[in-house]
Amino acid sequence: MSNREQSRGNYTDSKHNFFVVGIGASAGGLRALEEFFENMPTDSGATFLVIQHLSPDFKSLMKELLERRTRMAIYRVTEGMILEPNSISASS
């Protein structure tokens, strides 16, 4: 597979064939996110992108807060990161 095909996301193997679920929340949406991930199976095959609306003056603790509610791997979103199934990527 060429780099061009990979950059477009034209993957055929199962490791790269998964759903990406985007979830947006304000600071007041933390409890709903906690409940969601408490009840989400850790082997759904999806990756979850959690974006929190937060003042630029505050540092997000989303990663640390969600780690208490799920056994899925949780990563801070970084530019160019590779998404993995069965994980959460949270904005910082």
Image (cartoon, grey):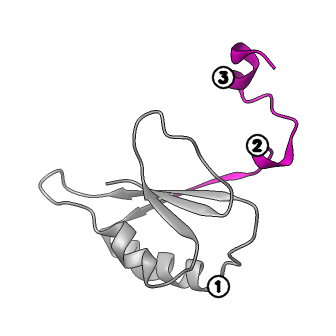
Residues under labels 1 and 2: Cα distance?
A: 24 Å
Residue type for callout 3: Ser
Residue extending furthest toward the left: 57
- Along the viewing direction, whichever of 26 and 89 lies nearer the viewer: 89
With respect to residue 1, does 81 lie above or below?
below
| Quadrant occupied by the N terminus | top right
Residue 78: x and y in percent read 39, 42
Question: In the rendered image, which residue does mark 2 sit on?
Answer: 16
Mark 1 = which residue? 39
Label ID, residue 7: 3
Image quarter of residue 6: top right
- Would residue 92 appear left or right of 2 to someone viewing this image? left
Q: Residue at x 59, y 62 (%)?
A: 87
The image quadrant of residue 38 is bottom right
Quadrant for the C terminus, please.
bottom left
Horizontal side of 23 relative to 41 (left or right) equals left
How many numbered discs, if any? 3
- Which residue does the image show at 42% across and 48% down from the upper left? 77
> On the image, which quarter does residue 52 sit in?
bottom left
Magenta stretch in the rendered image: 1-23
Q: Is residue 33 above or below residue 85?
A: below
x and y percent of residue 4 in the render? Answer: 70, 14
Residue 54 location (% of width, % of height): 26, 58
Task: Identify which amino acid the numbered label 1 is placed on.
Answer: Asn
Residues at marks 3 and 1, CA–CA distance in whole angstroms? 33 Å
